[in-house]
Image (tube, rainbow, N blue to C red):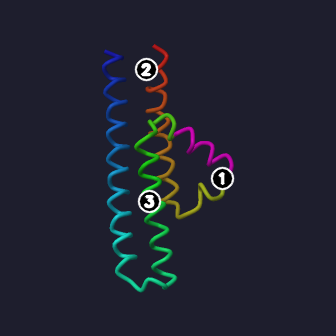
């Protein structure tokens, strides 16, 4: 029973990460189209184009990594830049804390699966 639940949680986490990557990729495409529709030499078009490129990079990275690797990178970033990690409104911090906590639980499940 434990193995079934663990596999289900890991599968769900993988699915959610792939959905997140697809959503980010879609947003990046929208941004790229927006940047191409504006004045080519404008600062805004350049910034939007850069944001689109970073969105694609993030989506590709999410496609390659599992929940455990994503959690490890998040923890490392939080250690290196705690102020930036916690920056934002209290609602953002609560949401961020929930996400990290959830990813931590998923990573423990994935680690347990890998140690079998």
Of the 4 image quadrants, the one containing the N terminus is top left
Asked if the residue at tag 1 contacts the one at tag 3, i.e. Cβ–Cβ closer than 8 Å, the answer is no
The residue labelled by disc 1 is 82
CA distance separating discs 2 and 1: 30 Å
Image quadrant of residue 76? Answer: top right
Tag 2's secondary structure? helix
> Could you tell me residue 12's position as x and y percent?
32, 35
User: Which segment did they paint magenta?
Assistant: 71-81
Of pointers 2 and 3, the one earlier in the residue sequence? 3
Image quadrant of residue 64? Answer: top left
> Could you tell me residue 107's position as x and y percent?
48, 31
Residue located 49% across and 24% down the image: 111
Of the 4 image quadrants, the one containing the C terminus is top left
Circle 2 Cα neighbour tier, 10 Å, few/some/many (<14 / 14–19 / ≥20): few
* Depicted 70 relative to depicted 42: above or below: above
> Could you tell me residue 13's position as x and y percent?
37, 37
The residue labelled by disc 3 is 55
* Depicted 101 relative to depicted 10: above or below: below
Disc ID at residue 113: 2
């Amino acid at each position: 029973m434990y193995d079934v639940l663990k596999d289900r949680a890991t599968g769900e986490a993988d699915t959610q990460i792939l959905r997140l990557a697809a959503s980010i990729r879609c947003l990046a495409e929208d941004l790229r189209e927006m940047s191409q529709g504006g004045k080519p030499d404008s600062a805004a078009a350049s910034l939007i184009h850069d944001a689109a490129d970073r969105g694609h990079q993030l989506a590709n990275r999410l496609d390659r990594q599992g929940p455990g690797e994503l959690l490890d990178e998040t923890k490392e970033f939080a250690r290196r830049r705690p102020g930036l990690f916690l920056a934002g409104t209290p609602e953002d911090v609560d949401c961020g804390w929930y996400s990290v906590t959830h990813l931590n639980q998923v990573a423990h499940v994935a680690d347990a699966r890998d140690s079998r």
